[in-house]
Amino acid sequence: MFFLETAILIFIGVFLLTYLTIPKIIKVVEYKRLMDDPNQRSSHSTRTPTLGGVAFFYTLVLALFFIRGRDIYDEVMHIIPGLTILFIMGLKDDLVVISPGTKLLAQVFAIIFVLTNPSFTIHSLNGFLNINEIPYYLYLIIGGFMMLTIINSYNLIDGIDGLASVVGMVIMVIYTTIFYMTEEYFFALVSITMNASLMAFLGFNLSSDKKIFMGDTGSLIVGFIISVLTLKFLALRPVAYTDLPFLLENAPLIAISILIVPLFDTARVFAIRIANKKGPFSPDRNHTHHVLIDYWGLSHKQASFIIGCFNLLFVMLFIVLGSTAKNLGMVIMLVSVVIILGYIFFKYNYNFATLKQKILLRRKVEKLKSRVEDKSGKKKKSLKSESQKTNSSGIRPVNGENRMEDRKEKHSIDSE
């Protein structure tokens, strides 16, 4: 009962704090002209305030102060340094673009603080693919790689209005439920805190007159929290799984299903870029949400809602299957789903050019052809008229002005 009261107070406090301070951030950003200018990749057409993630940072830090006594292994002192590093790096990237290598290095330092806390140590995979105990060095490799993947995957899906918030809210609801059932109340409260911030931010992100983006400041912070919660979920002791509705050995697959949207989109985009002989972090419009908008004509809200619902249904499906099915069968099913989704989003050939670019190019070519045809038709008509005059008078009028017009017309046609 005490947890529920604390959870309600934390949720209301964080929601109101985020909701009331974001307009202040918008005013400061507009006054200082720290706006996000649209480019050929952008899904917005006007200059839009960014730095919405600033609200995430200080609401999280304040919430961690009030719930710090519930962390058994003093996890707060390992989470806050990582949050601070990513906040500074994300803020700098929103103001002055930095290289992917610099961002990656900052993420590594932030992750190290978390991995050194014994609460996050993964001692065993509990029979997943017949793997049980794992050495500490292997945990560091697996945990570090997993956290890096989650942070960057979440950062990459922040491409349209509402998507990052909706997906983040779905993930936070699931982790809140898991940690409440396993009596890990500190992490349940962290999930509730992050969820309250995302809900308050979503209204502004979808607004037409008070729009703001979370920017790298926000996406890195949210991705970091998701990676921390995922690591803690996999580090739960076997006794904690007795109240969960799935088998202990299926925990890694449940974690993948929770993160299916960012993981699938990142794998797909990286594959496209590498196949196109580009760097995996080179920007483009080949993300899944861009496909839904550019080809299927969905709005930002529709695309975000559909992807969020898919994420939730996918998790529910795997939880149901994970209650009885062995992990090998679930792995086969997961691979099959990924292949099907990959086929659906690959078959329209988004690999080398977006549909929007193709449409613009086709329109330009058609417009060019019509202009050439109009010029040719006018020239033929003019020649026919002059021929008739010549036949009637016996003399074809030729002067400098006519020759100049012919040269201009010919030059215009040749240049087009």
Image: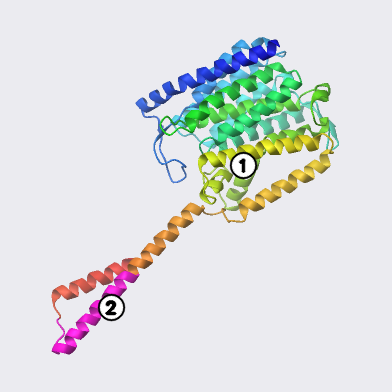
Magenta region, main secondary structure? helix
| Figure check: 104 above or below 14 | below
Quadrant showing the C terminus: bottom left
The quarter of the displayed image where residue 395 is located: bottom left
Residue matched to label 2? 380
Q: Dot 2 surroundings within 10 Å: few (below 14), some, or many (20 or more)?
A: few
Q: Mark 2 or 1 closer to N-term?
A: 1
| Residue 414 against residue 129 in the figure, above or below | below
Residue 380 on the magenta span = yes
Q: Amino acid at mark 2?
A: Lys
Taking the image as shown, residue 285 lies to the left or right of residue 175, namely: left
> Where is residue 3 drawn, in percent x and y?
69, 13
Q: Residues within 10 Å of mark 1 (few under 14, many from 20)?
A: many
Residue range of the region highlighted in magenta in the rendering: 373-397
Q: CA distance from mark 2 to mark 1?
A: 56 Å
226 on left or right of 16: right
Q: Position of residue 404 (x, y in %)?
A: 18, 72
* In the depicted structure, whether residue 362 falls above or below residue 392: above
Quadrant location of the N terminus in the rendered image: top right
Foreground label between 2 and 1: 2
Label 1 sits on residue = 266
Question: 369 left or right of 340?
Answer: left
- Residue drawn at x 57%, y 52% as measured from the top left: 277
Amino acid type at circle 1 is Thr
